[in-house]
Image: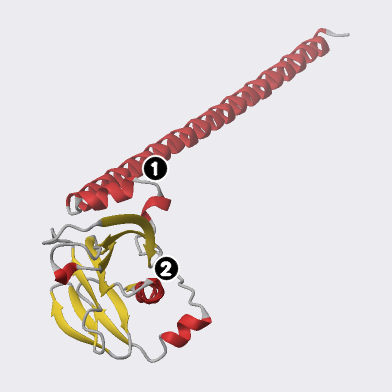
């Protein structure tokens, strides 16, 4: 090979080497730029997400603060009973209505009270049926008195709970439990025998049944003379029927 040809071969190899170097540098530059772009994009996305989460956290905190303030304002305007009712279990507070009651009457009782009128005490929330032939002769605060127009010694009355006493002590007192409109009641029967000193009290009977309605206590009395066991038994049955007609409104 001549010197000139050898010189050309060397220059060709040098050009080829420079070409490869240039291509390598270009590839490295491209890879570097791409890597930077990817790194920048990932970091930018992460930064946006952090900012987004921070913004959402701030919104949640603001809503919580507004809710707390609202509840505080509402609580300030409520009574103690309302606050306690909110704190107690739902089953304790969900129903403050009076319980319903079903009173069953026998066929004989239904026939006996057929056509009876009704006396209503709207102030204290109770009513009672008035027998035929009976007259209401006095209406007082919370109660009334009625009597059988044919039997002066037989009368019935309801009155609020008051202290009372008898001018002649009873010869015998019997106590028992009872029910009025599905609620517990207490009964006392006072008896005077024929030997008491005051003739007006001889053989007298008074039955007093105590019941409560609307947070107030009442007495339901029946007052009658004892004319033998049979008549007395009929009067007691009649009294029980009167009490069965009492309803709490």
Nearer the observer: mark 2 or 1; the answer is: 2
Crowd around label 2: few <14 · some 14–19 · many ≥20 (10 Å): few
The quarter of the picture where the N terminus appears is top right
The foreground one among 112 and 24 is 112
| 230 to the left or right of 108 | left
Q: Position of residue 79 (x, y in %)?
A: 19, 52
Q: Is residue 202 above or below residue 21?
A: below
| Numbered disc 1: secondary structure | helix
Q: Position of residue 109 (x, y in %)?
A: 46, 81
Is tag 2's residue or tag 1's residue first in the polypeptide sequence?
1
Quadrant occupied by the C terminus: bottom left
Quarter residue 175 falls in: bottom left
Q: Residue at x 28, y 56 (%)?
A: 173
- Rendered location of residue 74, percent (x, y): 22, 53
Q: How many marks?
A: 2
Q: Residues within 10 Å of mark 1 (few under 14, many from 20)?
A: few
Give the colour scheme of this rendering: secondary structure
Vertical order, 118 against 199 (above or below): below
Q: Residue 127: x and y, percent?
A: 29, 77
The image shows residue 126, relative to residue 73, as above or below, that is below
Q: Quadrant of residue 18?
A: top right
Name the disc covering residue 128, or none. none
Per the image, the residue denoted by label 1 is: 56
Q: Nearer the viewer, residue 214 or 143?
A: 143
Element at label 2: loop
**x 81%, y 10%: residue:** 6
**Nearer to the camera, 79 or 221:** 221
- Horizontally, residue 77 falls left or right of residue 94, namely left
- Tell me how far mark 2 sits from mark 1, CA to CA: 52 Å
Badge 2 is on which residue? 100
Q: Residue furthest left?
A: 167
């Amino acid at each position: 090979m001549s010197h000139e040809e050898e010189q050309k071969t060397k220059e060709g190899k040098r050009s080829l080497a420079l070409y490869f170097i240039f291509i390598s540098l270009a590839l490295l530059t491209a890879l570097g730029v791409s890597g930077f772009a990817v790194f920048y994009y990932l970091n930018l996305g992460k930064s946006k997400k952090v900012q987004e989460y921070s913004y959402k956290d701030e919104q949640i905190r603001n809503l919580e603060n507004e809710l707390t303030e609202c509840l505080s304002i509402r609580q300030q305007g409520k009574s103690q009973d309302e606050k306690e009712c909110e704190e107690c279990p739902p089953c304790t507070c969900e129903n403050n209505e009076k319980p319903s009651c079903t009173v069953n009457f026998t066929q004989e009782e239904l026939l006996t009270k057929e056509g009876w009128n009704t006396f209503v005490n709207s102030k204290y929330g109770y009513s009672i049926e008035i027998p035929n032939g009976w007259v209401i002769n006095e209406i007082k605060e919370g109660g009334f008195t009625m009597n059988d127009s044919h039997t002066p010694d037989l009368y019935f009355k309801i009155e609020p709970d008051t202290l009372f006493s008898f001018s002649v002590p009873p010869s015998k007192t019997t106590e028992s439990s009872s029910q009025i409109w599905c609620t517990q009641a207490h009964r006392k029967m006072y008896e005077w025998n024929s030997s008491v000193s005051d003739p007006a009290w001889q053989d007298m009977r008074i039955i007093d049944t105590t019941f409560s309605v609307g947070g107030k206590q009442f007495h339901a009395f029946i007052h009658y003379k004892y004319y033998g066991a049979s008549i007395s038994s009929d009067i007691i049955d009649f009294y029980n029927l009167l009490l069965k007609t009492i309803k709490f409104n």
